[in-house]
Image: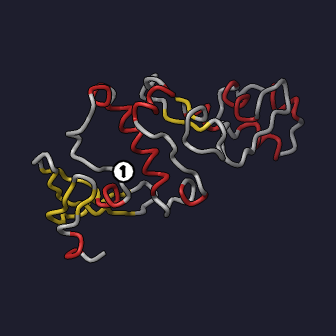
């Protein structure tokens, strides 16, 4: 959409009144990216700066003036709620919307009731069935280590003492690829699972 067509458009309670300089990002890999930003006037009378993709896809509809008390109290959970919602609205994201994953929570209140409060800053939302949707009964708060064992295409099968390669690798004090690499080198499973790091 051309810039002159964006200005004056209304998305939810937000009306675009100005195109702002994009926010630029640089990644460790050397890749660079930028996000289009717009200045919007909310129906409540406040001005707010927001990413254009957020209002275009319906992720952000207000300046937060319509927060209910429970939403304002749980800002971290609310941020996660909208992040998950955006993944499923962004059709260019091949890992979520691009493969049919949908966001079925009807409200933040339902989301919070299902998952409860975020246990710590190290936790994020994990879908129990990784091919399922964001919906009641299929989401939980998990750490990165737990989520590593719930990937879409599992590499680590339970083959020894009911532990996955990743779980046993971590218990030995190595990276989650430790045992996998040992087996690739020709180690027996018993030796790979029982030999501590030097």
Near-viewer residue (75 or 10) = 10
Q: In x, y percent, where is residue 169?
A: 71, 31
Q: How is the image coloured?
A: secondary structure
Compared to residue 127, the image places residue 115 above or below, namely: above
Compared to residue 14, the image places residue 195 above or below, namely: above
Please, what secondary structure does the residue beneath circle 1 have?
loop
Tell me which residue sits at (55%, 53%) in the image: 96
Near-viewer residue (184 or 161) = 161
Q: In x, y percent, where is residue 71?
A: 31, 30
Near-viewer residue (197 or 179) = 179
Tell me which residue sits at (14%, 63%) in the image: 17
Query: Image quarter for residue 173?
Result: top right
Compared to residue 17, the image places residue 114 above or below, namely: above
Tell me which residue sits at (70%, 29%) in the image: 167
Q: In x, y percent, where is residue 138?
A: 60, 35
* Quadrant assignment for the N terminus: bottom left
Compared to residue 10, the image places residue 192 above or below, namely: above
Tell me which residue sits at (42%, 28%) in the image: 121
Q: In x, y percent, where is residue 36?
A: 28, 63
Q: Residues within 10 Å of mark 1 (few under 14, many from 20)?
A: many
Identify the residue position indicated by label 1 in the image.
Answer: 59
72 displayed left or right of 28? left
């Amino acid at each position: 959409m051309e810039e002159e067509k964006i200005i004056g458009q209304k998305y939810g309670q937000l009306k675009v009144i100005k195109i702002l300089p994009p926010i630029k990002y640089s990644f460790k890999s050397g890749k660079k990216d930028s996000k289009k930003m717009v200045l919007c006037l909310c129906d409540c009378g406040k001005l707010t700066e927001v990413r254009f993709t957020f209002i275009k896809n319906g992720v952000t509809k207000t300046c937060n003036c319509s927060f209910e008390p429970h939403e304002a109290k749980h800002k971290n959970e609310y941020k996660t709620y909208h992040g998950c919602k955006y993944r499923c609205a962004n059709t260019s994201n091949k890992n979520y919307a691009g493969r049919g994953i949908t966001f079925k929570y009807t409200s933040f209140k339902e989301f919070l009731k299902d998952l409860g409060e975020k246990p710590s800053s190290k936790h994020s939302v994990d879908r129990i069935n990784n091919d399922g949707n964001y919906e009641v009964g299929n989401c939980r708060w998990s750490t990165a280590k737990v989520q590593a064992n719930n990937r879409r295409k599992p590499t680590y099968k339970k083959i020894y003492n009911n532990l996955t390669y990743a779980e046993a690798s971590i218990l030995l004090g190595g990276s989650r690829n430790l045992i996998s690499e040992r087996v690739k080198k020709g180690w027996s499973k018993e030796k790979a699972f029982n030999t501590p790091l030097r």
